[in-house]
Amino acid sequence: MKLGSHLHRIGNDIVAVHLVVTDEGVTVIDAGLPGHWRELTAELAALGRATGDIRGVVLTHGDSDHLGFAERLRRDHGVPVYVHAADAARARGETKSRASGGPVKLGATARFLGYAARKGGLRTTYLTEVVEVADGDVLDLPGAPRVIGMPGHSPGSIAVHVPAADAVFAGDALTTRHVLTGRLGPQPAPFTDDPEQALASLDRLADVDATWLLPGHGTPWDGGLDEAVRRIRATAATEPKAR
Protein backbone atom coordinates (compact mmCIF):
# COMPACT_ATOMS: atom_id res chain seq x y z
CA MET A 1 0.00 0.00 0.00
CA LYS A 2 1.51 3.30 -1.10
CA LEU A 3 1.09 6.22 1.31
CA GLY A 4 3.62 8.55 -0.31
CA SER A 5 6.42 8.65 -2.84
CA HIS A 6 8.85 7.12 -0.31
CA LEU A 7 6.36 5.48 2.03
CA HIS A 8 4.63 2.09 1.83
CA ARG A 9 2.72 -0.09 4.26
CA ILE A 10 2.09 -3.83 4.39
CA GLY A 11 -0.12 -5.71 6.81
CA ASN A 12 -3.30 -3.97 7.88
CA ASP A 13 -4.89 -1.96 10.69
CA ILE A 14 -4.42 -4.86 13.10
CA VAL A 15 -0.65 -5.17 12.61
CA ALA A 16 1.26 -2.90 10.23
CA VAL A 17 4.78 -2.84 8.80
CA HIS A 18 6.19 0.22 7.05
CA LEU A 19 8.77 0.62 4.32
CA VAL A 20 10.81 3.71 3.53
CA VAL A 21 11.85 3.42 -0.12
CA THR A 22 14.56 5.66 -1.58
CA ASP A 23 17.13 5.50 -4.37
CA GLU A 24 19.64 4.30 -1.76
CA GLY A 25 17.52 1.31 -0.77
CA VAL A 26 14.80 0.34 1.68
CA THR A 27 14.45 0.80 5.42
CA VAL A 28 11.89 -1.41 7.16
CA ILE A 29 10.21 -0.02 10.28
CA ASP A 30 9.11 -2.93 12.48
CA ALA A 31 8.78 -6.46 11.16
CA GLY A 32 5.21 -7.36 12.11
CA LEU A 33 4.46 -11.07 12.22
CA PRO A 34 6.34 -13.92 10.50
CA GLY A 35 3.59 -14.34 7.90
CA HIS A 36 4.10 -10.80 6.67
CA TRP A 37 7.17 -12.10 4.82
CA ARG A 38 5.11 -12.88 1.70
CA GLU A 39 3.59 -9.41 1.73
CA LEU A 40 7.04 -7.91 2.13
CA THR A 41 8.50 -9.71 -0.86
CA ALA A 42 5.39 -9.03 -2.96
CA GLU A 43 5.50 -5.31 -2.15
CA LEU A 44 9.18 -5.15 -2.96
CA ALA A 45 8.64 -6.97 -6.26
CA ALA A 46 5.87 -4.53 -7.21
CA LEU A 47 8.37 -1.73 -6.64
CA GLY A 48 11.05 -3.44 -8.70
CA ARG A 49 13.05 -4.15 -5.54
CA ALA A 50 14.15 -7.26 -3.67
CA THR A 51 15.26 -8.23 -0.17
CA GLY A 52 18.80 -7.35 -1.22
CA ASP A 53 17.70 -3.70 -1.36
CA ILE A 54 16.80 -3.68 2.35
CA ARG A 55 19.55 -1.88 4.25
CA GLY A 56 18.15 -2.22 7.76
CA VAL A 57 15.20 -2.97 10.02
CA VAL A 58 14.42 -0.47 12.78
CA LEU A 59 12.29 -1.84 15.62
CA THR A 60 10.19 0.62 17.59
CA HIS A 61 10.40 -1.82 20.52
CA GLY A 62 11.04 -5.46 21.25
CA ASP A 63 7.56 -7.00 21.49
CA SER A 64 6.85 -10.18 19.55
CA ASP A 65 4.26 -8.69 17.18
CA HIS A 66 6.93 -6.30 15.89
CA LEU A 67 9.76 -8.85 15.52
CA GLY A 68 8.10 -10.98 12.83
CA PHE A 69 10.54 -11.58 9.99
CA ALA A 70 13.40 -9.49 11.45
CA GLU A 71 15.65 -12.42 12.37
CA ARG A 72 14.99 -14.03 8.99
CA LEU A 73 16.24 -10.90 7.26
CA ARG A 74 19.24 -10.69 9.57
CA ARG A 75 20.17 -14.37 9.41
CA ASP A 76 19.48 -15.13 5.74
CA HIS A 77 20.16 -11.77 4.10
CA GLY A 78 22.63 -10.04 6.40
CA VAL A 79 20.27 -7.16 7.18
CA PRO A 80 21.12 -5.39 10.48
CA VAL A 81 18.30 -4.93 12.98
CA TYR A 82 18.30 -1.80 15.12
CA VAL A 83 16.61 -1.52 18.52
CA HIS A 84 16.99 0.79 21.51
CA ALA A 85 19.52 -0.51 24.03
CA ALA A 86 16.85 -0.70 26.74
CA ASP A 87 14.81 -3.14 24.61
CA ALA A 88 17.68 -5.23 23.27
CA ALA A 89 17.09 -8.01 25.80
CA ARG A 90 13.37 -7.95 25.01
CA ALA A 91 14.06 -8.35 21.28
CA ARG A 92 16.30 -11.32 22.08
CA GLY A 93 13.54 -12.95 24.15
CA GLU A 94 15.42 -12.58 27.43
CA THR A 95 12.76 -10.35 29.05
CA LYS A 96 9.08 -9.83 28.35
CA SER A 97 6.35 -7.36 29.18
CA ARG A 98 4.10 -8.22 32.11
CA ALA A 99 1.68 -5.37 31.44
CA SER A 100 -2.07 -5.90 31.39
CA GLY A 101 -3.95 -5.32 28.17
CA GLY A 102 -6.73 -3.44 29.96
CA PRO A 103 -10.34 -3.47 28.69
CA VAL A 104 -11.32 -6.31 26.37
CA LYS A 105 -14.15 -6.88 23.90
CA LEU A 106 -14.51 -10.45 22.74
CA GLY A 107 -14.99 -9.78 19.03
CA ALA A 108 -12.05 -7.39 18.67
CA THR A 109 -9.75 -9.58 20.72
CA ALA A 110 -10.73 -12.67 18.70
CA ARG A 111 -9.97 -10.82 15.45
CA PHE A 112 -6.55 -9.78 16.76
CA LEU A 113 -5.64 -13.25 18.01
CA GLY A 114 -7.03 -14.93 14.90
CA TYR A 115 -5.07 -12.64 12.59
CA ALA A 116 -1.91 -13.13 14.61
CA ALA A 117 -2.34 -16.91 14.48
CA ARG A 118 -2.86 -16.90 10.71
CA LYS A 119 0.31 -14.84 10.31
CA GLY A 120 2.44 -17.15 12.43
CA GLY A 121 2.34 -15.02 15.55
CA LEU A 122 1.96 -17.98 17.90
CA ARG A 123 5.65 -18.78 17.43
CA THR A 124 8.15 -15.95 17.82
CA THR A 125 11.64 -16.00 16.36
CA TYR A 126 13.65 -13.69 18.58
CA LEU A 127 16.73 -11.82 17.45
CA THR A 128 20.13 -13.33 18.12
CA GLU A 129 22.00 -10.13 17.25
CA VAL A 130 20.90 -6.49 17.33
CA VAL A 131 22.45 -3.10 16.73
CA GLU A 132 21.68 -0.94 19.76
CA VAL A 133 20.56 2.66 19.27
CA ALA A 134 19.88 5.61 21.58
CA ASP A 135 17.66 8.66 21.67
CA GLY A 136 18.77 11.23 19.09
CA ASP A 137 20.69 8.84 16.86
CA VAL A 138 20.39 9.44 13.12
CA LEU A 139 20.91 6.10 11.47
CA ASP A 140 22.94 5.58 8.31
CA LEU A 141 19.99 4.03 6.49
CA PRO A 142 17.76 5.10 3.60
CA GLY A 143 15.74 8.12 4.69
CA ALA A 144 18.16 8.93 7.54
CA PRO A 145 15.76 7.79 10.30
CA ARG A 146 16.09 9.69 13.59
CA VAL A 147 15.47 7.91 16.88
CA ILE A 148 13.12 9.58 19.37
CA GLY A 149 13.08 7.97 22.80
CA MET A 150 9.49 7.22 23.88
CA PRO A 151 9.80 5.07 27.02
CA GLY A 152 6.62 3.85 28.63
CA HIS A 153 5.15 1.12 26.48
CA SER A 154 8.49 -0.56 27.06
CA PRO A 155 11.75 0.81 28.49
CA GLY A 156 13.25 1.13 25.00
CA SER A 157 10.15 2.16 23.07
CA ILE A 158 11.00 4.69 20.36
CA ALA A 159 9.43 6.70 17.59
CA VAL A 160 11.28 6.99 14.29
CA HIS A 161 11.19 10.25 12.34
CA VAL A 162 11.95 10.03 8.63
CA PRO A 163 11.70 13.47 7.00
CA ALA A 164 12.09 11.98 3.50
CA ALA A 165 8.85 10.06 4.05
CA ASP A 166 7.19 13.00 5.87
CA ALA A 167 6.41 10.51 8.61
CA VAL A 168 6.97 9.56 12.21
CA PHE A 169 6.57 5.90 13.08
CA ALA A 170 5.27 5.53 16.62
CA GLY A 171 5.16 1.78 17.16
CA ASP A 172 3.11 1.19 20.32
CA ALA A 173 3.83 4.55 21.91
CA LEU A 174 0.22 5.14 20.84
CA THR A 175 -2.40 3.44 18.70
CA THR A 176 -5.25 4.36 16.40
CA ARG A 177 -6.91 0.96 16.83
CA HIS A 178 -7.10 -0.74 20.20
CA VAL A 179 -6.56 -4.37 19.25
CA LEU A 180 -8.46 -5.66 22.31
CA THR A 181 -11.55 -3.41 22.12
CA GLY A 182 -11.69 -2.32 18.47
CA ARG A 183 -11.94 1.31 19.47
CA LEU A 184 -10.67 3.62 16.72
CA GLY A 185 -8.79 6.90 16.84
CA PRO A 186 -5.64 8.09 18.63
CA GLN A 187 -5.48 6.57 22.13
CA PRO A 188 -3.08 4.86 24.52
CA ALA A 189 -1.88 1.44 23.40
CA PRO A 190 -2.66 -1.68 25.42
CA PHE A 191 0.03 -3.83 27.07
CA THR A 192 1.95 -0.74 28.16
CA ASP A 193 4.48 -1.25 30.95
CA ASP A 194 4.21 2.26 32.40
CA PRO A 195 1.13 4.16 31.14
CA GLU A 196 2.01 7.41 32.94
CA GLN A 197 5.50 7.44 31.47
CA ALA A 198 4.07 6.67 28.04
CA LEU A 199 1.79 9.72 28.26
CA ALA A 200 4.68 11.92 29.37
CA SER A 201 6.76 10.68 26.44
CA LEU A 202 4.21 12.10 24.00
CA ASP A 203 5.81 15.49 24.69
CA ARG A 204 8.73 14.24 22.58
CA LEU A 205 6.54 14.56 19.48
CA ALA A 206 5.83 18.27 20.01
CA ASP A 207 8.61 19.54 17.75
CA VAL A 208 8.33 16.84 15.07
CA ASP A 209 7.30 18.11 11.64
CA ALA A 210 5.53 15.28 9.82
CA THR A 211 2.27 14.76 7.97
CA TRP A 212 1.99 11.07 8.78
CA LEU A 213 1.79 9.55 12.24
CA LEU A 214 2.05 5.81 11.81
CA PRO A 215 1.36 3.44 14.70
CA GLY A 216 2.08 -0.26 14.68
CA HIS A 217 -1.64 -0.95 15.06
CA GLY A 218 -4.37 1.13 13.45
CA THR A 219 -4.93 3.41 10.51
CA PRO A 220 -2.34 5.98 9.44
CA TRP A 221 -3.09 9.38 10.99
CA ASP A 222 -2.68 12.66 9.10
CA GLY A 223 -4.78 14.90 11.31
CA GLY A 224 -1.82 16.58 12.99
CA LEU A 225 0.48 15.32 15.71
CA ASP A 226 -0.75 17.85 18.26
CA GLU A 227 -4.34 16.77 17.73
CA ALA A 228 -3.40 13.11 18.04
CA VAL A 229 -1.64 13.77 21.35
CA ARG A 230 -4.61 15.79 22.61
CA ARG A 231 -6.98 12.93 21.85
CA ILE A 232 -4.72 10.33 23.44
CA ARG A 233 -4.50 12.28 26.67
CA ALA A 234 -8.24 12.97 26.68
CA THR A 235 -8.94 9.26 26.27
CA ALA A 236 -6.43 8.33 28.96
CA ALA A 237 -8.12 10.71 31.40
CA THR A 238 -11.42 8.84 31.07
CA GLU A 239 -10.16 5.27 31.08
CA PRO A 240 -9.91 3.07 34.16
CA LYS A 241 -6.37 2.25 35.17
CA ALA A 242 -5.13 -1.11 33.86
CA ARG A 243 -4.10 -3.56 36.57
Image: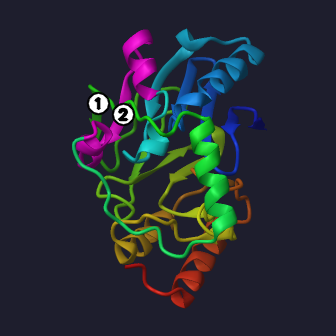
Against 110, residue 134 (above or below) is above
- Residue 110 part of the magenta segment: no
Q: Residues within 10 Å of mark 1 (few under 14, many from 20)?
A: some
The magenta segment is: 70-93
Locate residue 213, reporting x and y percent.
Answer: 63, 55
- The residue labelled by disc 2 is 82
Q: Quadrant of the C terminus?
A: bottom left
Q: Residue at x 52, y 82 (%)?
A: 236
Quadrant of the rendered structure where residue 153 is?
Answer: bottom left
* Residue 233 pos. (x, y %): 54, 81
Q: Position of residue 139 (x, y in %)?
A: 40, 33
The quarter holding residue 75 reads top left
Q: Are marks 1 and 2 in contact (CB under 8 Å)?
A: yes
Q: Which residue sits at x=54%, y=36%?
A: 33
Q: Residue at x 39, y 19 (%)?
A: 74
The majority secondary structure of the magenta stretch comes to: helix
Quarter of the image containing the N terminus? Answer: top right
Taking the image as drawn, is residue 214 in sight?
no
Who is closer to the viewer here, 154 or 94?
Answer: 94
Label of residue 131 in the image: 1
Mark 1–mark 2 Cα distance, whole angstroms, equals 5 Å
- The vertical placement of 165 against 225, above or below, is above
Q: Nearer the viewer, residue 133 or 107?
A: 107
- Is residue 141 among what the camera can see? yes
Label 1 vs 2, first from the N-terminus: 2
* Mark 2 surroundings: few (<14), some (14-19) or many (≥20) residues within 10 A: many
Amino acid type at image mark 2: Tyr
Q: Is residue 86 magenta?
A: yes
Label 2: element kind: strand
User: Residue placed at 44% from the left, 46% from the top?
Assistant: 60
